[in-house]
Amino acid sequence: MEAIAKLRNIPTSPRKMRLVADLVRGKKVNLALNILKFEPKIGARKIEKLILSAVANWTQKNEGARVEDADLFVKTIFVDGGRQLKRLRPAPQGRAHRIRKRSNHVTVIIDSFQAQVTDKAFDQSPEAATA
């Protein structure tokens, strides 16, 4: 059973946030949280809180299951561009340069490793091969 968490309108550029998201893609949740705890980039704190939120969403969906036994991992994480605030900065000789203040949206999907194994075993059953 997978759980989703989204964070919208983070006031950093998507390119900077993708560098942090690439560090934890496909990693187990405990390892991803340890990586993000010691990462100096500004987006690491926000993604760390987002992964903790996804774990909380997973526990709400799976009452009675323990997080330690579930073997959770970051299935997908992606960063999309958000809205841009357009500002003007004075330039020489009466001109103006446009400044684009970018923002982004981050989506994290975590899943249990056992659920992945059972789904693959179900897909490779002999009945499916003959049909």
Image (tube, grey):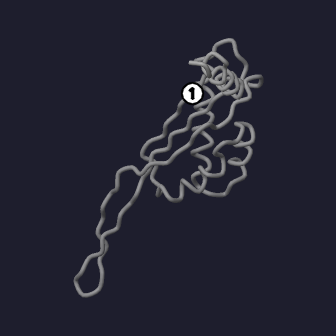
Residue corresponding to mark 1 = 3
**Three-letter residue code for mark 1:** Ala
- The residue at the point 53 percent across, 31 percent down is 4
Q: Which of 95 and 31 is in front in this view?
A: 31
Q: Of helix, strand and loop, which one carries label 1?
A: strand
Identify the image quadrant of the N terminus: top right
- The residue at the point 49 percent across, 48 percent down is 79
Q: Could you tell me residue 9's position as x and y percent?
A: 42, 46
Marks counted in the figure total: 1
Q: Could you tell me residue 83's position as x and y percent?
A: 35, 51
Q: Nearer the viewer, residue 127 or 65?
A: 127
Farthest-out residue, left? 94
31 sits to left or right of 120? right
Tell me the quarter of the picture where residue 128 sits.
Answer: top right
Q: With respect to residue 55, does 19 lie above or below?
A: below
Q: Could you tell me residue 68's position as x and y percent?
A: 76, 25
Farthest-out residue, bottom? 93
86 sits to left or right of 105? left
| Circle 1 crowding by C-alpha within 10 Å: few under 14, some 14–19, many from 20 | many
- The residue at the point 66 percent across, 57 percent down is 40
Q: With respect to residue 36, does 63 lie above or below?
A: above
Tell me the quarter of the picture where residue 60 sits.
Answer: top right
Identify the image quadrant of the C terminus: top right
